[in-house]
Image (cartoon, rainbow, N blue to C red):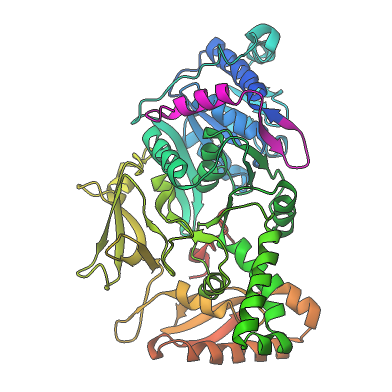
């Protein structure tokens, strides 16, 4: 396989896997590679007839689905620039993204289109449904009729392995503009070139074993690069069958899909893994009889083996590894999973690197790290002693973005004159370039004598205590306080009154302070009655609470 060019990967995989299943909407219909190629051909016919050019921006708005995947491949395979839009954005943000990106065409989910005002996106010439590719809105009747005519196999002609062609990008050409909601407010449009996507995919092919016919469940939003690359583009590049969760991915739905599809590789975010640990594993481990048996060495290993087998079955029983990314994994959960030899690993990345910065297979992963620096990248820690002294993580290499779309100042702030991308994350490295993350630059607090306090580490500890579902630690009047959203399921089960719940939180505060240094003691816990607002990656929007 020639791996020098991005789109060449897809032209080849379509020809080689023509009759194999490519995409399924979970509990819905399945599309083969050949059937998807036919739709791509029809879309391309319209693009040519309507004068859409290579390099034009084309937006895709909707939840994961087979048609979302086909639309993206049609845009990329035409040489246009994809603008994936997260379905969680409100209409005003969607209008802003479409206008700022200068998108000229839009594929949209019907329900999201209904909430939009077409008059506010005047440069969009046509809007097409992601449900069935029917015309939703066009500038004029002539263009609408043209879409209907071109979007037919009778007019566009039949696609076959012999005539299936896609247009290629040069490696430094823009391929995707990614607008994501960040933890510090509305973020910028990240310009991701073809070389970045290609580098990520080639790395995955070399280090994450998948082959034609293997199965994947896609539930991470494809409008974010983690889901886009590793639940979609990488699997398709080797001929996998991708099943998309078309509904909001609750932990219950995700687990059911894993058990039905039995995927060969699983991508996840910590939230899903931690919920399974707290709801399914921890209650059993805390039973008095089991606590006693776990102290008996021989029996302990037998119980760990049973827990591992049960957990593997929960995820479908057919995967070789779970790759966790998007946010740090709770230390207690990581330690327990290591103890029972559960096959998981933790990666680190960011949209600006399309996304990978570090990864290591579960068999050689180093505990508490975020993996090893990936191929074609360099890392540097901005401190006097990068092995021991925490500093900002800087990276450069093939994966790094071109910059922020129409924002030269933000680009200059992020990428210095030597090409180093300033990630905003704090950490250290070891001699083998394993990265250990300690927190975010913007989140770091100063202790009374200038000590660095990393609230994420404190929050990970507090999240393990009774009735704490999630929390945010910040500074108020020179004191550290924790805002806690209590676990509604525990409240429903045990029904504590308000005074009892406050008492529990006071006890939690005392207990967690015993685990913390003197300069990082919590002064109090404040209960909140609503779940914290989150980004589509399920990271808390900290700026709203600090």
- In percent of the image, x 53 and y 34: which residue is there? 238
Q: Residue most toward the front?
A: 298
- How far across and how far down the image is residue 151, in percent? 67, 15
Toward which corner of the image does residue 302 lie, by quadrant?
Answer: bottom right
- In percent of the image, x 68 and y 39: which residue is there? 112
- In percent of the image, x 55 and y 11: which residue is there? 163
Q: Considering depth in this image, is 30 or 515 the residue closer to the camera? A: 30
Question: In the rendered structure, does residue 17 fall within the stretch colored magenta?
Answer: yes
Q: Considering depth in this image, is 100 or 202 the residue closer to the camera? A: 202
Left or right of 296 on screen, residue 419: left
Q: Is residue 512 above or below residue 128?
A: below
Toward which corner of the image does residue 131 lie, by quadrant?
Answer: top right
Q: Is residue 15 above or below residue 187?
A: above
- How far across and how far down the image is residue 247, in percent? 72, 47
- In percent of the image, x 43 and y 52: which residue is there? 350
Q: Start and end of the magenta stretch?
A: 1-30
Q: Is residue 397 above or below residue 442?
A: above
Question: In the rendered structure, does residue 356 fall within the stretch colored magenta?
Answer: no
- How far across and how far down the image is residue 256, in percent? 75, 54
- How far across and how far down the image is residue 505, in percent? 62, 87
Residue 311 visible in the shown view: yes
Left or right of 504 on screen, residue 4: left
Query: Number of numbered discs present?
Result: 0
Q: Is residue 50 above or below residue 187?
A: above
Residue 531 visible in the shown view: no
Left or right of 496 on screen, residue 312: left
Split into 4 quadrants, where in the image is the N terminus?
A: top left
């Amino acid at each position: 396989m020639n791996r020098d060019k991005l789109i060449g990967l897809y032209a080849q995989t379509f020809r080689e896997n023509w009759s194999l299943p490519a995409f399924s909407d979970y509990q819905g219909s399945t599309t083969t590679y050949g059937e998807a190629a036919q739709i791509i051909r029809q879309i391309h016919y319209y693009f040519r007839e309507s004068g859409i050019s290579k390099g034009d921006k084309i937006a895709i708005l909707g939840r994961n689905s087979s048609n979302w995947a086909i639309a993206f491949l049609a845009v990329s395979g035409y040489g246009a620039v994809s603008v994936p839009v997260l379905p969680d954005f409100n209409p005003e943000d969607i209008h802003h993204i479409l206008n700022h990106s200068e998108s000229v065409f839009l594929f949209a989910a019907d329900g999201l289109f209904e909430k939009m005002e077409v008059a506010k996106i005047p440069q969009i010439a046509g809007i097409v449904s992601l449900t069935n590719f029917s015309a939703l809105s066009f500038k004029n009747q002539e263009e609408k009729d043209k879409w209907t005519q071109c979007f037919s196999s009778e007019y566009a002609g039949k696609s076959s392995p012999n005539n299936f062609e896609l247009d290629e990008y040069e490696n430094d050409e823009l391929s995707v503009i990614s607008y994501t909601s960040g933890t510090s407010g509305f973020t910028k449009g990240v310009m991701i070139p073809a070389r970045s996507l290609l580098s990520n995919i080639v790395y995955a092919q070399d280090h994450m074993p998948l082959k034609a016919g293997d199965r994947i469940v896609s539930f991470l939003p494809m409008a974010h690069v983690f889901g886009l690359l590793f639940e979609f583009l990488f699997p398709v590049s080797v001929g996998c069958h991708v099943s998309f969760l078309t509904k909001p991915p609750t932990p219950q739905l995700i687990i059911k899909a894993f058990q039905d599809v039995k995927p060969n590789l699983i991508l996840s975010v910590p939230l899903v893994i931690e919920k399974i640990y707290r709801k399914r594993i921890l209650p059993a481990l805390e039973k008095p009889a089991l606590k006693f048996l776990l102290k008996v060495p021989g029996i302990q290993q037998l119980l760990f083996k049973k827990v591992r087998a049960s957990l593997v079955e929960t995820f479908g029983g057919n995967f070789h590894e779970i790759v966790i990314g998007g946010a740090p994994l709770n230390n207690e959960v990581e330690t327990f999973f290591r103890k029972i030899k559960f096959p998981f690993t933790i990666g680190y990345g960011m949209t600006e690197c399309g996304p990978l910065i570090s990864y290591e297979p579960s068999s050689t992963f180093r505990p508490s790290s975020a993996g090893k620096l990936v191929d074609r990248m360099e890392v540097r820690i901005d401190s006097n002693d990068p092995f021991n002294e925490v500093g900002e993580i800087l990276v450069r290499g093939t994966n790094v973005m071109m910059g922020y779309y129409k924002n030269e100042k933000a680009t200059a702030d992020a990428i210095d004159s030597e090409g180093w991308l300033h990630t905003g994350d704090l950490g250290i490295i070891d001699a083998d370039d394993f990265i250990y993350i300690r927190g975010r630059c913007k989140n770091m607090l100063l202790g009374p004598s200038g000590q660095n306090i990393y609230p994420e580490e404190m929050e990970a500890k507090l999240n393990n205590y009774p009735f704490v579902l999630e929390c945010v630690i910040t500074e108020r009047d020179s004191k550290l306080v924790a805002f806690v959203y209590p676990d509604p399921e525990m409240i429903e089960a045990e029904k504590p009154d308000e005074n009892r719940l406050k008492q529990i939180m006071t006890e939690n505060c005392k207990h967690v302070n015993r685990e913390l240094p003197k300069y990082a003691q919590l002064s109090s816990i404040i209960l909140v009655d609503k779940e914290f607002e989150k980004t589509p990656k399920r990271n808390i929007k900290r700026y709203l609470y600090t």
